[in-house]
Each structure stands twice: as structure tokens, then as C-alpha cells.
Amino acid sequence: MPKPFALLEARTAAAAFRRLSNSAASIEDENGNVRVDAIFANGYAAGQVGALGMASSQPALALPTVQVPANPVGLRVTVDGQAYLIADARNDGTGETHLLLELA
């Protein structure tokens, strides 16, 4: 059973994303397209990629962890009509997950 703080954190993250969402996004899983409340960034810079700390720039989608499918890598995402594939998913431990995207 989830701990009380984890439940509060999940509810708070979901409410924040409902208010701050800046894109019309959906994730296609085995059940079809699922609409998600997300914040889209078209130029995400990830530091500390690999042992040398190289950087990468790619689109990213931030959303509540409770809206992320169990195994999201490889799933198709549509953001404002543009199709992407999920290249990586990073749960930050605070109820938010960042999906790194590639053009489909």
C-alpha cells in the first residue's frame, strides 16, 4: 500500500499538471491513445549523459508519474499533432517523470 505522503505527492503533481499543461499530448499504449496532462519542451538539454558528462538536446515531455505506462520506452507519443517515440523515461522521484523523445 502506498504511503500517505506518496498519495499526496501524486495528487499534487496531477493537479499541478492539469493547470500548467502547455500541450495536447497522448501516449499510445496497448489500450489505445491515452490523453495526458504534460509540459512539452522542444529542446531539452540533458547533462551527465555517459561517463564523460556529454550533453544531448532533444524534445522532452514532463508529466505526472501516475500517467506514465509501465514500460513507456518505444511507445508512440503525439504532442500538438507531431508524432514522437519515447526514447527514455526518467522518474525524478517527486511524482514527475520526464520522457525523452525522438521524432517518429
Image (cartoon, rainbow, N blue to C red):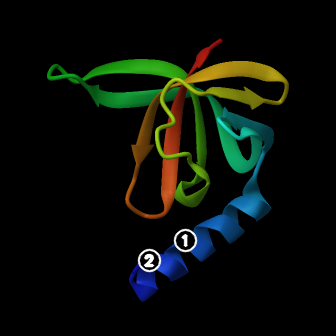
Residue at image location 45% in from the left, 37% down from the top = 89
Amino acid carrying mark 2 in the image: Ala
What residue occupies the far bottom of the structure in this picture?
4
- Where is mark 1, residue-wise? 10
Query: Relative to residue 80, is residue 4 drawn left or right?
Result: left
Secondary structure, mark 1, is helix
Instruction: Where is residue 27? Give x, y as percent.
Output: 69, 36
44 relative to 64, above or below? above
Q: Return the residue nearer the eye: 24 or 7.
A: 7
**Label 1 neighbourhood size at 10 Å, few (<14), some (14-19), many (20+)?**
some
Would you say the residues marked 1 and 2 are in contact, meaning their CB atoms lie under 8 Å apart? yes
Instruction: Where is residue 76? Give x, y as percent.
Output: 65, 25
* Quadrant of the rendered image containing residue 86: top right
Secondary structure, mark 2, is helix
Query: Relative to residue 69, is residue 53 drawn left or right?
Result: left
Residue at image location 38% in from the left, 60% down from the top = 93
* Quadrant of the rendered image containing residue 5: bottom left
Instruction: Where is residue 20? Give x, y as percent.
Output: 74, 57
73 relative to 91, above or below? above
Amino acid carrying mark 1 in the image: Ala
**Label 2 neighbourhood size at 10 Å, few (<14), some (14-19), many (20+)?**
few
Instruction: Where is residue 24? Give x, y as percent.
Output: 83, 40
Alpha carbon distance from label 1 to label 2:
6 Å
Disc on res. 25: none
Q: Quadrant of the C terminus?
A: top right
15 relative to 55, above or below? below
Query: Relative to residue 29, is residue 72 drawn left or right?
Result: left
- Where is mark 2, residue-wise? 6
Q: Return the residue nearer the eye: 36 or 19.
A: 36
Residue at image location 41% in from the left, 42% down from the top = 90
Residue at image location 65% in from the left, 35% down from the top = 29
